[in-house]
Image: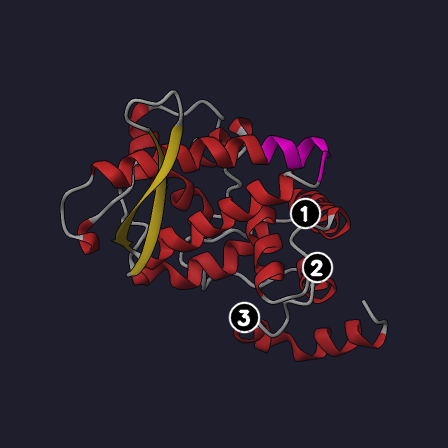
């Protein structure tokens, strides 16, 4: 649980103007992490006029507005708060599915890319995405979520939040990861324990300076890491 502040516009009495009012709420930490990422994407879009940056900024703003309204309406205990706005995103992240592309989401839910109601229900509602049982899944499948990897670099001070170059660097690595993944057996896993990082994924982790964060997941392949470092990748 963590305390956050939610701002909303409210008309000033007897004036043709508005002011921002703030309210505090305690919500589960995983929601706060995702909200922080979306706020960062919004801020980044103010400086980066690239198509993907602006597309994500628009998306982030819509999600933040929606979850803000959701938090304001909630009257129960913070520990029991479950977001109808953020849960679908977390369910996709948990299973290594980027949340901004409908075709990719459909392919993840259904083998033929045409999800049935039953398949969608199982994908989104069968599990509680806030369960601690899925920590390893989130960590392992983070490699397939470029926005989250970019934000992690910002948090670890490996990248400047406003840097267009750093933002595009992660997205370029994502293209390589997806291309390599298409040539390999499906390595995305729900439990986070059944698959290892591929060579392309390891290279991206090292290039992005995330090897310390992924130290546990990478511990099985020390030899590969040492070889890649020799070539300063």
Task: Kindly identify the residue that appears in the image at 38 percent across and 20 percent down.
Answer: 16
The image quarter in which residue 17 lies: top left
Observer-nearest residue: 74 or 209? 74
Task: Kindly identify the residue that appears in the image at 43 percent across and 35 percent down.
Answer: 63
**Quadrant where the C terminus lies?**
bottom right
Label 2 Cα crowd, 10 Å radius (few <14 / some 14-19 / many 20+): many
**Quadrant where the N terminus lies?**
bottom left
**Where does the image place residue 209, in percent across and percent down from the top left?**
68, 67
**Could you tell me what secondary structure mostly forms the magenta stretch?**
helix
**With respect to residue 44, does 33 lie above or below?**
below
Q: CA distance from mark 3 to mark 1?
A: 19 Å
Left or right: where does residue 139 sit relative to residue 118?
right
Q: CA distance from mark 3 to mark 2?
A: 14 Å
Which residue is under mark 3? Answer: 217
Label 1 Cα crowd, 10 Å radius (few <14 / some 14-19 / many 20+): many
- Mark 2 touches mark 1? (CB < 8 Å): yes
Q: Which residues are magenta?
A: 48-56
Q: Looking at this rendering, what residue extends furthest in the left direction?
A: 76
**Where does the image place residue 231, in percent across and percent down from the top left?**
86, 72
């Amino acid at each position: 649980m963590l305390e956050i502040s939610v701002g909303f516009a409210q008309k000033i009495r007897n004036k043709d103007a508005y002011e921002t009012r703030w309210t505090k709420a305690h919500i589960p930490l995983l929601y706060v992490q995702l909200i922080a990422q979306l706020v960062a994407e919004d801020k980044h879009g103010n400086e980066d006029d690239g198509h993907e940056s602006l597309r994500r900024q628009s998306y982030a703003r819509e999600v933040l507005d929606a979850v803000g309204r959701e938090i304001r309406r909630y009257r129960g205990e913070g520990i029991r708060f479950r977001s109808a706005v953020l849960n679908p995103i977390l369910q996709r992240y948990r299973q290594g599915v980027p949340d901004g592309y409908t075709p990719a989401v459909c392919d993840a839910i259904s083998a033929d890319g045409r999800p049935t109601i039953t398949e969608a229900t199982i994908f989104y509602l069968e599990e509680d995405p806030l369960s601690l049982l899925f920590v390893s899944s989130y960590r392992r499948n983070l490699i397939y979520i470029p926005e989250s990897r970019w934000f992690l670099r910002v948090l670890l001070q490996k990248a400047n939040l406003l840097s267009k170059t750093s933002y595009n660097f992660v997205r370029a690595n994502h293209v390589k990861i997806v291309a390599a993944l298409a040539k390999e057996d499906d390595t995305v896993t729900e439990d986070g324990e059944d698959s290892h990082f591929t060579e392309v994924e390891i290279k991206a982790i090292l290039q992005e300076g995330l090897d310390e964060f992924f130290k546990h997941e990478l511990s099985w392949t020390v030899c590969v890491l040492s070889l890649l470092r020799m070539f300063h990748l």
